[in-house]
Amino acid sequence: MKTIAVLPAGSVSDEAAKHLFQNEEVNWKHHRLISDVFLSTVNGVSDYSIIPIENTIEGSVSLHMDWLVHEVDLPIQAEWIYPSIQNLIGRQSELATEEGIIDFSRINKVISHPVAIAQCLQFLRTHLPHAVTEHVSSTAEGVRIVRNNPDAGWAAIGTMTAAGNEKLDVLSSEITDHDNNYTRFLLVGANPYTARHSDTRKTSILITLPEDYPGALHQVLSAFAWRKINLSRIESRPTKKKLGNYYFYIDIEMALDTVLLPSAIQEIEAIGCQVRILGSYPSFAESKNV
């Protein structure tokens, strides 16, 4: 039986993980902090870690990217896209009028993960402009805090699963700013993921440019372009070694064991670039009605 490290039960990460492994027996290791999720697999306590890496509304989760690049050496074994459906959660008995209508003026604080709060800014500005927001380590943690503080006038942003786990009410459902709110998750660990098949494969690499080569980035992109290799994502992040020194994170819509991609990497290395392979893996796209 596989052991999977993931953020707390009831978080979007937890829902997404259980969707990927829905037909398998799994031992779940829930952790409050993403650093503990990573370290669980690094230290051999779990076989894989589940990492949210990118969101439709907020873009990249930089903290998680930096952990993947700077702190650990865990290959990417799979990616999948999962709908992030956020809801306002609290106690209806505490916050509703006698007619059963939620009185938003009674809510003085909204608690959640910063990414989830950012996904719901329009709702918060419209209905809760007076409420302060508090950031916690996961959406599930926010729901737990609200459960433990009755009569405080607090609400959380989280999943329906978390509301059910903590026996709280969904005060307003699907409050994200856009209907097409999806999160991209990575499965990282030492062993290849073989439980499900996908015809779509991707490769992620990290490129550090030589300092004394003008036009190096243009040369890198040209190595992919003339081979008609599609890049689905390119992002720069600081190397943390020197001001103005960046690495480039690139997602490539091609498996590493093709003819074209290894030759492109060889061309890039020939001009003095450092290339690190983060993983070559199956990619799964899920609809909102999973």
Image (spheres, rainbow, N blue to C red):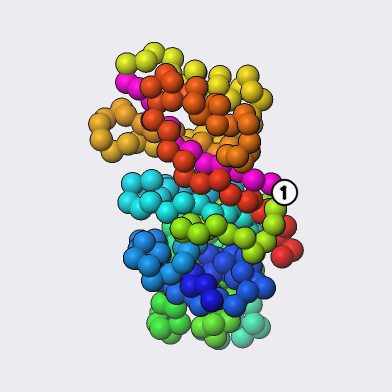
Residue drawn at x 55%, y 21% is: 223
Instruction: Decide which of 28, 143 is in the foreground and name it.
Output: 28
Q: Is residue 244 above or below residue 278?
A: above
- In-image side of 4 versus 173 (left or right): left
Q: In the picture, which quadrant includes the N terminus? A: bottom right
Q: Position of residue 136 (x, y in %)?
A: 39, 65
Residue drawn at x 50%, y 22% is: 267
The residue indicated by pointer 1 is 199
Q: Is residue 273 above or below residue 236?
A: above
- In-image side of 161 versus 220 (left or right): right
State the count of labels: 1
**207 in the magenta segment:** yes
Q: Position of residue 235 (x, y in %)?
A: 48, 35
The single residue placed furthest to the left in the displayed view is: 242
Q: Is residue 197 above or below residue 223?
A: below
The reply to whether residue 264 is in sight is yes
The span shown in magenta is 199-211
Q: In the picture, which quadrant includes the C terminus? A: bottom right
The single residue placed furthest to the top in the displayed view is: 214
Residue drawn at x 66%, y 83% is: 99
Q: Position of residue 106 (x, y in %)?
A: 49, 74
Q: Secondary structure at mark 1?
A: loop
- What amino acid is labelled 1 in the image? Asp
**203 in the magenta segment:** yes
Residue drawn at x 46%, y 67% is: 47
Q: Is residue 161 above or below residue 59?
A: below
- In-image side of 56 versus 153 (left or right): right
Specify the principal SS of the magenta part: strand
Instruction: Decide which of 244, 24 is in the foreground and name it.
Output: 24
The reply to whether residue 182 is in sight is no
